[in-house]
Image: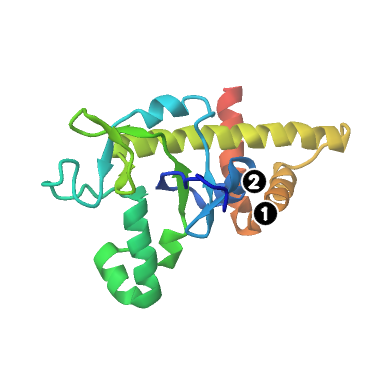
Amino acid sequence: MSEKGYKMPVVAWLKVTDYMHGWLQKELVGGTRIGGKKVVCLQHLDGARDVLRMETCNDVTGDDETEEPDVQENSLSATRYGCIDAGLALDPKTVQRHYGMGREELALFVPIECPRTCLTKNGVLRPWTSDTCFGRQQSAALLKVLREAFWRGVAEYDREYARRMDGEKYAAVDMIEAFCRDMGTSDLYVDAMRREWQRRAKRIKD
């Protein structure tokens, strides 16, 4: 944006289940793009603010700048993501060998808007920088927050779908297919989503 004084948000990248991406891009984003993807804002979701206060880490230099970086499986700092993204454009084989990641793996990561401060593993509050990524427990907790919000969204869609069907019975797969179409999600994920939806429905009944 060209507005004077506008600052790009600080983000960390989170690895998110592939079939959730369409919903994320429709329900939890504004207009800001980083790395070609719209930035996800989840601070308003139930439990998210507490999770964002959990311990983070630095995957570039280490929290006190003398440690080895603490590389996470499910999170990348903005700096590390940028390095991998640029490297894949220049020498994908070397990046795959060094980082264990190609374009398909990198595509699973989405930029999450972060608060102004973070808690380091040493218990110190510091500004959230482009070298900060989510800690292991924090990543898992954030994914849980997003999963629960996603399936609440599917449940809400199911109720609306039932109203549209006006009492006519329908198969779960039909609703899931309609959800995927509306969210711009590939139909390749329909079966996986249907199985998880039915597992969740069964747990509620039990």
Q: CA distance from mark 2 to mark 1?
A: 9 Å
Which residue is drawn at the image coordinates 79% and 40% (left, top)? 170
Report whether 167 appears left or right of 147.
Answer: right
Residue 90, percent across and down?
36, 76
Q: Which residue is mark 1?
A: 184
Q: Quadrant of residue 167?
A: top right
Report whether 164 appears left or right of 21.
Answer: right
Residue 21, percent across and down?
56, 50
Residue 74, percent across and down?
36, 47
In front of the other: 170 or 1: 1
In front of the other: 63 or 205: 63
Give the SS element for disc 1.
loop
- Point out which mark residue 162 bears: none
Report whether 51 appears left or right of 23.
Answer: left
Residue 3, percent across and down?
57, 48
Query: Closer to us: mark 2 or mark 1?
Result: 2
Tell me the quadrant of the picture where the C terminus can be found.
Answer: top right
Give the SS element for disc 2.
helix
Residue 161 vs 81, above or below: the answer is: above
Q: Amino acid at mark 2?
A: Lys
In front of the other: 168 or 145: 145
In front of the other: 18 or 94: 94
Q: Amino acid at mark 1?
A: Gly
Pointers 2 and 1 in contact (C-beta within 8 Å): yes
Task: Decide which of tag 2 and tag 1 comes sooner along the chain.
Answer: 2
Which residue is drawn at the image coordinates 64% and 46% (left, top)? 26
Q: Residues within 10 Å of mark 1 (few under 14, many from 20)?
A: some
Q: Quadrant of residue 161?
A: top right
- Point out which mark residue 26 bears: 2
